[in-house]
Image (tube, rainbow, N blue to C red):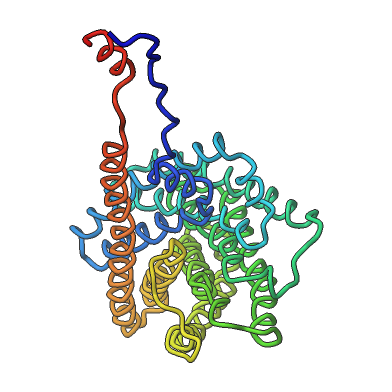
Amino acid sequence: MLWGMETAVRPEPAPSPLREHLAAGLKGLHPAYFALVMATGIVSIVSDVLGLREAAALLFWLNVPAYAVLWLLVAARALRYPRALAADLASHQRGPGFFTSVAATCVLGLQLVLLRGDAAAALALWWVGMLLWCACTYAVFVALAVRDPKPTLGEGINGGWLVAVVATQSVVVLGTRALVPRYPGSEAVLFFLASLWLCGGMLYVWMISLIFYRYMFFRFSPSDLMPPYWINMGAVAISVVAGTSLAALAPGSAFLGALLPFVKGLTLMFWATATWWIPMLVLLGIWRHGGPSRIRIAYDPLYWGLVFPLGMYALCTYRLGELFAMPVLPWVARTFATVALAAWLLTAFGLAGRFLQLVVLAVRSLHAERGAAGPQPGSLERMARRS
């Protein structure tokens, strides 16, 4: 017999590459990932407006679980990596991304009321969006204001800041569809929504002035031109939708009736501004990806921030055509709706590719763990007894 043989002690297993990858992904989850819900929601709404009912319904049913999963990931990140979440809140680069949660909530609410006729759920999401707007507005901007040290303007400002405008106007748009029917004839509600619309417009003026100044007077490399710069256009596009929504309520309101010429004029100015941005952004995109220092196109969650403005421009152009009875504008809207749907599909393929990489990594990790597994605990002891 073999005497004195001790039970083998298994070494600590090496960390799974898949677990490390997932943990790193959760820790670095970008606050702007809710742009996925924004983009999917607006393409769904535009599809419904233009008569593509099946596409609109499919995108709606994709958007509901996407919204829920993102909130679960945010909750998991807050519990597992609270310091990373707090650091994002005070980051000039990533902090404004929290406003995508507001816009995503309101866009989903708009889908519910337009596609499903669920006014109660839409109203509930309006209240959630309103609370998130208050929390993000004063948490993010106060955190950035008191941060020390601060980055330079060239390092700290980007198009993603304009998501704050998008969030503000999304509350207005959903409010006209969910809050106004709940309180019919309430001038106070209309006064509040009109004031919030003007607040969003003023936020745009403040922020776009800094962004344009950064364009013209600071060094600008292709890597600086991130996809969220398309929100330069998207922020005024959603302001157009909010303006047309308020104008549609003017016949039943003395308050809005008195403001109607002003609302129409400002709405047209917003649309003209959005239209001006499109050639500029296209040319800059060509320079970014086709110039001497070109950047290869690869999936990035920030690309959802490019899809959303395209869909919103299609919707705002369609609504403006209705407001001013301009037959050519719905045709323009259909063209941009097609572009937005194509952009959504390309970005979705990129996301699917990322998921496929995770599946491959999971399979490899499983095979690696099985191959590296040694004898089971106690197996050497049993062999000793047999001998």
Q: Position of residue 329 (x, y in %)?
A: 35, 81
Assign the N terminus to one quadrant of the image. top left
Q: In the drawing, does residue 28 fall left or right of residue 55?
A: right
Q: Nearer the viewer, residue 141 or 275?
A: 141
Q: Position of residue 26 (x, y in %)?
A: 48, 45
Residue 289, placed above or below residue 311: below
Q: Position of residue 275 (x, y in %)?
A: 47, 83
Residue, x 69% and y 53% (percent of image)? 90
- Residue 374 appears in which quarter of the rendering? top left
Residue 135, placed above or below residue 333: above
Residue, x 80% and y 60% (percent of image)? 149
Residue 5, placed above or below residue 249: above
Q: In the drawing, does residue 54 fall left or right of residue 350?
A: left
Tell which residue pokes out farthest to the left in this image: 54
Assign the C terminus to one quadrant of the image. top left
- The answer to whether residue 55 is visible is yes
Residue, x 49% and y 74% (percent of image)? 230
- Residue 308 appears in which quarter of the rendering? bottom left
- The answer to whether residue 255 is visible is no
Q: Position of residue 101 (x, y in %)?
A: 51, 50
Q: In the drawing, does residue 48 fall left or right of residue 206?
A: left
Q: Nearer the viewer, residue 368 or 357?
A: 368
